[in-house]
Image (cartoon, grey):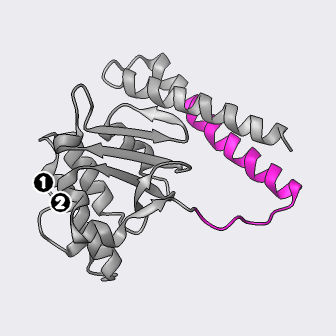
């Protein structure tokens, strides 16, 4: 589990990573007991260089919201996530979706116990700024978008094959990734068409 170990941040050792680690650990202690949430928090603790603790999730490619304590008002859920505007229903599916990604992960925490801490105050950002825009020619942009469409089509095909194979244990997960791939292809196609 997360614990007090700093092994996951020893190689970098920066104060910012240490503070992010402290925030994730504190969040883990305030969240309701849930193995999938603990799994996600462990995943985040292992990728502190990509995690941004933010007040607003606007514009975030990967957006996660945790709610605990008084801020989790019934019937509110302790976890919500969106990847490229596609809602992700469970922490385990989110980890699965992010395993091969190197995108920024933006985390909003709604928990008085966590947001009152010094570590949180030191690392919280108003919102995700993202990387500086890269100057690319229209041909380079089109080639990049086509490559992403091709990759997403590969995921789509793999999901269709898995659905046709009829694995009942992974059915919901495969349907989720199929929907995610369809939406990603549509969004990329719109970007490609807009020139």
Please indicate whether residue 66 sits to the left or right of residue 38 in the image: right
Residue 20 visible in the current orientation = no
Which is more toward the observer, 22 or 13? Answer: 22
In the displayed structure, would residue 23 be above or below residue 165? Answer: below
Q: Residue at x 14, y 71 (%)?
A: 5
- Residue 46 figure quarter: bottom left
Element type at marker 2?
Answer: helix
Tell me, for residue 26, which label it has, or none: 2
For disc 1, the marked residue is: 29
Give the image location of residue 112, x and y in percent.
21, 52
Query: Would you call the spot at circle 2 few (<14 residues within 10 Å), some (14-19), or many (20 or more)?
Result: many
- Residue 183 figure quarter: top right
Q: CA distance from mark 2 to mark 1?
A: 5 Å
Write down the region rendered in magenta.
130-158
Give the image location of residue 56, x and y in percent.
45, 51
Give the image location of residue 152, x and y in percent.
62, 39
């Amino acid at each position: 589990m997360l614990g007090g170990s700093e092994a996951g941040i020893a190689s970098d050792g920066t104060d910012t990573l240490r503070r992010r680690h402290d925030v994730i650990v504190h969040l883990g202690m305030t969240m309701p007991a849930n193995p999938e949430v603990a799994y996600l928090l462990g995943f985040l603790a292992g990728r502190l260089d990509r995690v941004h603790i933010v007040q607003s999730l606007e514009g975030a490619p990967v957006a996660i919201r945790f709610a605990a304590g008084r801020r989790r008002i019934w019937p509110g859920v302790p976890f919500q996530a969106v990847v490229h505007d596609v809602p992700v229903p469970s922490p385990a599916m989110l980890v699965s979706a992010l395993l091969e990604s190197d995108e920024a992960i933006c985390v909003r925490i709604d928990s008085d116990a966590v947001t009152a801490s010094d570590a949180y105050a030191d690392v919280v950002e108003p919102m995700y700024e993202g990387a500086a825009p890269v100057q690319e020619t229209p041909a380079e942009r089109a080639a990049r978008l086509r490559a992403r469409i091709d990759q997403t089509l590969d995921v789509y095909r793999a999901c269709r094959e898995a659905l046709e194979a009829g694995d009942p244990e992974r059915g919901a997960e495969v349907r989720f990734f199929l929907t995610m791939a369809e939406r990603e292809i549509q969004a990329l196609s719109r970007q490609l068409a807009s020139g």
